[in-house]
Image: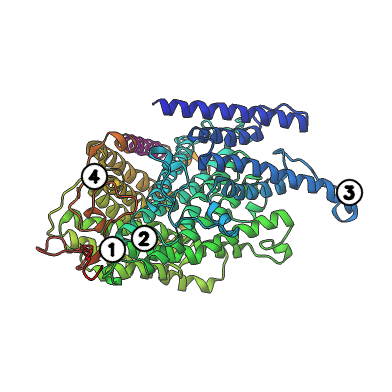
Amino acid sequence: MKSFWRGLASFLIGAVAGYALGVILEFVITGKLTYGAPVASAFAFFFGFTALAYLGGRNSTIFRGLFWQVVGTFSGAAVMTLLRWILPMVNPAKFGAMDLFGPFLFTEPAWVLGGFVGALTFLAGSGVMDDWFKWMRGIDTPEHHEERFTGFEKYINASLDHKVIGIQYTILALLLLCIGGIFAMIFRTELVASKLQFLTEDLNVFGQNGPQLYNTLMSLHGMVMIVSILLGLAGMMNYLIPLMLGAQDMAFPRLNAFSFWIAVPAGALLLSSLFLGGFDTGWTGYPPLSTRSPLGIQMFFLGVFVAGWSSILGSLNILVTVVRMRAKGMAAMKMPVFIWSSVAASIISLTATQLIGLAFQLVLFQRLLGMGFYDPAKGGNPVLFQHLFWFYSHPVVYVFVLPGLGVISELLPVFVRKPLFGYRWVSMSSLGIALVGFLVWAHHMFSSGMNEYLRVPFMYSTLLVAVPTGVKFFSWVATIWQGKPITPTAMLFVLGAIVVFLLGGLTGPPNATVSTDLHLHDTYYIVGHFHDTIFGGFVFPFFAALYYWFPKATGRRMNETLGKIHFWLMTPSFFVLTVGMMYAGMLGMRRRIVDYDPALGLDSTHLVLTISGYLIAISIAVFLWNFFYSIKHGEKAEGNVWNSRSPEWQVPSPMPTHNYDRPFEVVGEPYDYGLEGSKYVQFIEPAPNSAAGKH
């Protein structure tokens, strides 16, 4: 508790100092003393988190990175402001008069350049790239650096150990998950009844009135949650893939560290949009609305663009690791299903992430430089944005769910003590989903005004996704059939994931068929369907993975009673929430609106939805307490607590720094549970050192 109060005090001191500096700067430049100014709030945000990071020490990676991000952001903004002052004096005819300051202290071009420079200075100043800089100067560095830190400090400093990086990803994912959840609870509370409750037009927070703030929170909720999901997936894959393959680390340890640490300034940029005017586009950022939104949309675009680097580089690292670093005897059809799922997800991330970056970048340039990519008056086409955006943003749904479905296939045989039914089909179905996933994006655009002849082909290709997905469901049902299941918390979340994802799958075809989608599009039915898909495909499997592999990472188990409270509080509440959303949508409730017509008769429905949302939030709070308390005080669990065949459970917990003291050889099938005498891996004994023949 002392650490908590120290952290809170540091954050508050930094936030107050940043707020005061922002108010003073704005007063000096504008002559106005505005205490609710967004500039002061932005300063408080950056300074508060930097002060919090200072607790880890002045030389910690997180503090150095955030400090240099602040310095880089304001330096980049100052350079752009200086250029805007000099250029009109050099060539008045060409440049004319340029504003030096704007409603958010700096002008939009200054904030954009500052945000980009800040992300780069975070990386350069944090020490993540030190080895690369030394190589450029001809200085050799060790292949693997020994860990200099222990305990909590290990996770706020740069490390090349894939296990540490996996945990760093997971903690950052949980942090953003909580932030995105808080945003959701704020606007969910506003929707508890028709008419405005507290987000009124008289409200002024961060320079936004109530409806404007609703738009910002709703939009940020979507993208912050998406980024947190990608980070959570990266956490699971980074931690588990080398262990399952028998590798000492990832193929490119330094690139692995870089991929994580670039996500930190990306998250800061994304959240800073809240304090710099917000934005009103939803998480999709569609033009032409995004070309006229406040400054916050540029920080949103920039944050997602930078976060994309993490996704691309991380997926490249995973693919190389799987191809090049498998243990002896681990042929493709003897790899764990989780690795097959991760490979499929990584192929999508590597090849499609550039498209959302490009879509956002073109809007960013259109706003800054007057280019007309999406402006019909200049020969542009706003529908082009949707094609670029959805070519990534629908396949990324399969990035979200494929590793989660791999977790289900991984854990189910362990807890029913039966072989996984149809292992080869399940493995190939992941690649099938990834392939077909690239051919379905335009079902999001049936009502957009795109060419009508494209509708039917995309309708059929979207329905085709059900085939490889159905393979997994048949496998899971057949695996459970006549098994001997036990139901610890991890297994409960596996079963919950199957049911919730099934509900998401069954509610999907009405969105895939043109005739029904034209009526359901942009209603709450879509919101309910999407949450079913994401919770069933990622959130439930993510919790299952955390409960299951927690002993491997910490040597302790999470409390089973609290875990079951978490499950039984969250699961029924979630069913009520999403079914209620779809019910409201079919009655005409539109999504992304701050208020709704009382004549719809949905006030009682929204009251139930809000109560369900709060129950889910309480269940997450129970999980967080269980998670962090169990790290030090959980029941010790140093052996193979689940009686698993997977190689990481054949060595003591927590895992040694370099994973395996002895290499292993794959000698059997990965999921032959219940078959007497079968073995998946066998550790290779070192050859005896013989002195024969040596004199």
What distance separates the C-alpha of mark 4 from that of mark 1?
A: 22 Å
Q: Is residue 327 visible?
A: yes
Q: Earlier in the sequence, mark 2 or mark 4?
A: 2
Q: Secondary structure at mark 3?
A: helix
Above-or-below relation of 523 to 70: below
Identify residue type, mark 3: Met
Residue at (45, 65) in percent of width and height: 348
Residues at marks 2 and 3, CA–CA distance in whole angstroms: 57 Å
Mark 2 residue type = Leu
Q: Residue 92 — which label?
A: none
Residue type of the residue flagged with mark 1: Pro
User: Disc 2 or disc 3, which is closer to the eye?
Assistant: 3
Rounded to the nearest angstrom, the CA distance separating label 1 from label 2 is 13 Å
How many numbered callouts? Answer: 4
Residue 512 appears in the figure: no
Q: Which residue is mark 4?
A: 489
Q: Earlier in the sequence, mark 2 or mark 3?
A: 3
Residue 502 in the image: x percent, y percent?
30, 57
Distance between mark 4 and mark 3 Cα atoms:
69 Å
| Residue 609 lies within the magenta run | yes
Query: Where does the magenta region start and end?
Result: 604-625
> Which element carries disc 1, helix, strand or loop?
loop
| Nearer to the camera, 482 or 461 | 482
- Which residue, given by chain and number where applicable, does mark 1 sit on? 336
SS at circle 4: helix
Give the Cα separation between the discs numbered 3 and 1: 65 Å
